[in-house]
Image (cartoon, rainbow, N blue to C red):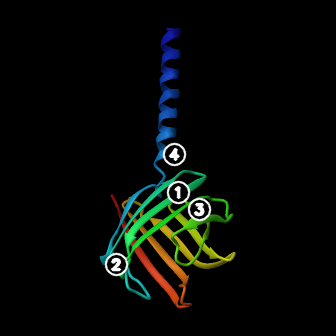
């Protein structure tokens, strides 16, 4: 009888550990996201021809790798890794800056500040839909030419 109780307790503890690991691995920001041009808007344009964004996130940090073709047909590539601590981290391939700071607003929302010379030039708020199938990133700030930017970029999860 005592053996059965111990076996049941062990099974429950093991199940809890497996679910805990699965929950950490399934951060809503994580995954491969494909640009949806029909649902996106760019001001100013032109919109890119394609973007594939790969994100790996957990409760402490995020790693972003993005590749695409811009509106003029040129290849783009963005990379950065940052903790959700508001500190600046190096970024490559961002036209508007060379550093980012990232904060988690809630379980489905991140805010990224793109910086150049220590000053924020663009803020990107990325929200994952409640069903986890869509990512909407709103870019607000100035581009390299000093023009106001308001881009709403929609991605579908692969």
**Do the residues bearing badges 2 and 4 touch, measured as CB atoms within 8 Å?**
no
| Mark count | 4
- Name the residue beneath numbered marker 4: 24
Q: Nearer the viewer, mark 2 or mark 4?
A: 2
> Does 19 sit above or below residue 50?
above
Between the residue at mark 3 and the residue at mark 4, the CA separation in whole angstroms equals 15 Å
Indicate which disc, 2 or 3, sits on the residue closer to the N terminus. Answer: 2
Calculate the distance from the C-alpha at mark 1 to the C-alpha at mark 3.
13 Å
Q: Which residue carries the number 2 mark?
A: 73
- Residue marked by disc 1: 63
Closer to us: 29 or 54? 54
Q: Residue at x 58, y 75 (%)?
A: 97
Q: Which numbered disc flags the more N-terminal residue, 2 or 4?
A: 4
Decide if residue 132 is on the left or right side of residue 89.
Answer: left
- Looking at the image, which residue is at 57% across and 69% down? 112
Q: CA distance from mark 2 to mark 4?
A: 38 Å
Cα–Cα span, label 2 and label 1: 26 Å
Position above or below: 103 against 1: below
Q: Nearer the viewer, mark 2 or mark 3?
A: 2
Is 20 on the left or on the right of 50, as rendered?
right
Q: Mark 3: which secondary structure?
A: strand
């Amino acid at each position: 009888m005592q053996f059965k109780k111990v076996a049941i307790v062990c099974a429950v503890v093991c199940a809890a550990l497996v679910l805990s690991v699965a929950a950490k691995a399934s951060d809503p920001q994580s995954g491969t996201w494909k640009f949806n041009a029909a649902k996106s808007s760019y001001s100013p344009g032109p919109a890119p021809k394609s973007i594939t964004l790969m994100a790996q996130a957990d409760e402490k940090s995020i790693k972003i790798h993005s590749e695409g073709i811009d509106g003029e047909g040129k290849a783009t590539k963005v990379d950065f890794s940052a903790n959700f601590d508001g500190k600046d981290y190096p970024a490559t391939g961002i036209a508007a800056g060379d550093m980012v700071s990232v904060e988690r607003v809630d379980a489905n929302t991140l805010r990224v500040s793109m910086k150049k010379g220590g000053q924020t030039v663009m803020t990107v708020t990325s929200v994952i839909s409640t069903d986890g199938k869509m990512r909407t990133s709103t870019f607000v700030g100035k581009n390299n030419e000093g023009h106001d930017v308001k881009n709403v970029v929609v991605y579908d999860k692969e």
